[in-house]
Amino acid sequence: MQAEQEDRFQEFVRARWSHLVRTAYLLTGDAHHAEDLTQTALAKAYRSWRRVSGSDNPEAYVRRMLVTCNSDRFRKRRVKESLTDAPPERAGREEAVARVDERGALMAALAQLPPRQRAVVVMRYWEDLSEAEVAEVLGCSQGTVKSQASKGLAKLRTYPGLAQVVDRAPQGGTR
């Protein structure tokens, strides 16, 4: 890779690392898996950085790589995920601490969704991507995104203690 391309890649990683790790955390439910997944996706992006950086939206390209790498993880071997009661980071403010239980319940509920539904729910409602953007990232139709989001939210609503959290989620079709 030429020095200029290398610099662009490093700049991209510095700017988007935490955002990509956060997305990977929502996909995997584990901080360590999230970092591994992000590193794997970025390693693949590095190998083809000329093509990635030449795309209309390099971040969407790498986000797609995250989803694909996560799916590959399940194809290679079945991974049983068990989440902790609370996410690893602790907030300092009272309001944030009050949401830890809610967040832990959400992570546990997300872990119960099939990988495709989880990817759609994370990208649609956490990343706030439009249906068209999610469809582009996942390489599927907008109808598939709508149905997977609907099924995923329906499953989340049945998870104990999570119904009120899911009911506050923005409903699709606004973007």
Image (tube, helix red, strand yellow):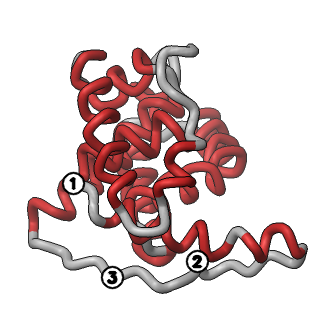
- Residue matched to label 1: 114
- Secondary structure type for disc 3: loop
* Upstream in sequence: badge 3 or badge 1: 3
Instruction: Give the percent coordinates (x, y) of residue 107.
Output: 46, 67
* Upstream in sequence: badge 3 or badge 2: 3
- Neighbor class of circle 1 (other Cα within 10 Å; few <14, some 14-19, many 20+) is few
Q: Quadrant of the C terminus?
A: top right
Residue at left offset 28%, top offset 64%: 112
Above or below, 8 relative to 35: above
Q: Nearer the viewer, residue 136 or 89?
A: 89
Residue at left offset 44%, top offset 39%: 62
Q: Nearer the viewer, residue 21 or 171?
A: 171
Q: Nearer the viewer, residue 150 or 121?
A: 150
- Secondary structure type for disc 2: loop
Instruction: Tell me whether circle 3 and circle 2 mark residues in contact (CB < 8 Å).
Output: no
Mark linked to residue 82: 3
Q: Amino acid at mark 3?
A: Ser
97 relative position to 35: left or right:
right
- Neighbor class of circle 2 (other Cα within 10 Å; few <14, some 14-19, many 20+) is some
- Residue matched to label 2: 87
Above or below, 52 relative to 7: above
Instruction: Give the percent coordinates (x, y) of residue 37.
Output: 39, 62
Instruction: Give the percent coordinates (x, y) of residue 21.
Output: 55, 58
Instruction: Give the percent coordinates (x, y) of residue 71.
Output: 21, 53
